């Protein structure tokens, strides 16, 4: 028979652990003869007092960084898969740009702890994955195909608008990643200088 999640959580809770310790005190009282014939109610009562007196479990509202990054990676993979399913309708070069954006963002998402400690980068990646890229592609794909390819006098075609948006989003993704990996690049540069200095000695 399966044990419910609530029962499992309670078994590992502070209240249950403190209650068990208090109940063990009742067993000790019984073994030393102090509890008498009422030893079972004494143990149960001490367990209850301990469980009620224990502090409540700490509330944890923050999402585990690894879980948050995993969800974003899943969203990104799902987005790219949906776009590839519409590959015939996408303008030339659009899929290549989207794949590059995906690679850049995925490299950042592979370091969830560091990403969680960098709110600016976290916001930038989340905005790109869940707002900017989907909005650009959805808007284009929801247009009738003939509007998508039609040329408008004095303005870009819908395909041209999408290409311009993806170019800007690609630059945005690269800027977000460059800021995120700035310390790594600095360390690499410092090591190069150290090796050059050592070679001159």
Image (cartoon, helix red, strand yellow):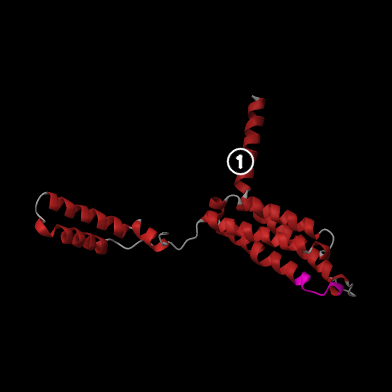
To which residue does mark 1 refer?
A: 187
Note whether residue 183 is visible: yes
SS under mark 1: helix
Front residue of 47/170: it is: 47
* Res 161 quadrant in image: bottom right
Reply above or below: 194 against 30.
above
> Would residue 117 be visible to someone looking at this image?
no
Q: Is residue 141 left or right of residue 37?
A: right
**Residue name at image x 61 percent, y 53 percent:** 109
Q: Is residue 177 magenta?
A: no
Quadrant containing the N terminus in the rendered view:
bottom left
Residue 130 in picture, x, y percent from top left: 64, 65
In percent of width and height, residue 46 lies at: 19, 60
Q: Nearer the viewer, residue 32 or 118?
A: 32
Q: How many other residues sit within 10 Å of disc 1, few (<14), some (14-19) or many (≥20)?
A: few
Residue at 62% over, 38% down: 190
- The x and y percentages for residue 17 are 29, 55
Which contiguous range is marked in magenta?
Answer: 139-146
The quadrant of the image that shows the C terminus is top right
Magenta span main SS: helix
- Please indicate whether residue 191 sits to the left or right of residue 58 in the image: right
x, y (%) of residue 171? 73, 57
- In terms of image quadrants, where is residue 19? bottom left
């Amino acid at each position: 028979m399966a044990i419910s999640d609530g029962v499992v959580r309670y078994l590992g809770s502070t209240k249950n652990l403190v209650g068990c310790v208090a109940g063990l005190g009742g067993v000790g009282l019984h073994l030393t003869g102090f509890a008498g014939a009422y030893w079972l109610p004494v143990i149960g009562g001490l367990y209850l007092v301990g469980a009620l007196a224990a502090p409540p479990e700490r509330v944890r509202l923050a999402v585990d960084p690894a879980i948050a990054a995993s969800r974003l990676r899943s969203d990104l993979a799902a987005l790219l898969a949906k776009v590839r399913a519409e590959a015939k309708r996408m303008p030339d070069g659009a899929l290549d740009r989207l794949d590059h954006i995906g690679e850049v963002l995925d490299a950042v998402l592979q370091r969830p702890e560091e990403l969680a400690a960098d709110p600016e980068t976290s916001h930038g990646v989340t905005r790109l994955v869940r707002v900017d890229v989907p909005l650009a592609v959805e808007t284009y794909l929801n247009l009738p195909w003939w509007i998508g390819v039609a040329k408008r006098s004095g303005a870009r075609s819908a395909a041209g608008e999408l290409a311009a948006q993806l170019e800007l989003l690609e630059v945005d993704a690269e800027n977000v990643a460059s800021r995120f990996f700035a310390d790594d690049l600095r360390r690499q540069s410092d090591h190069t200088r150290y090796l050059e200095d050592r070679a001159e000695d």
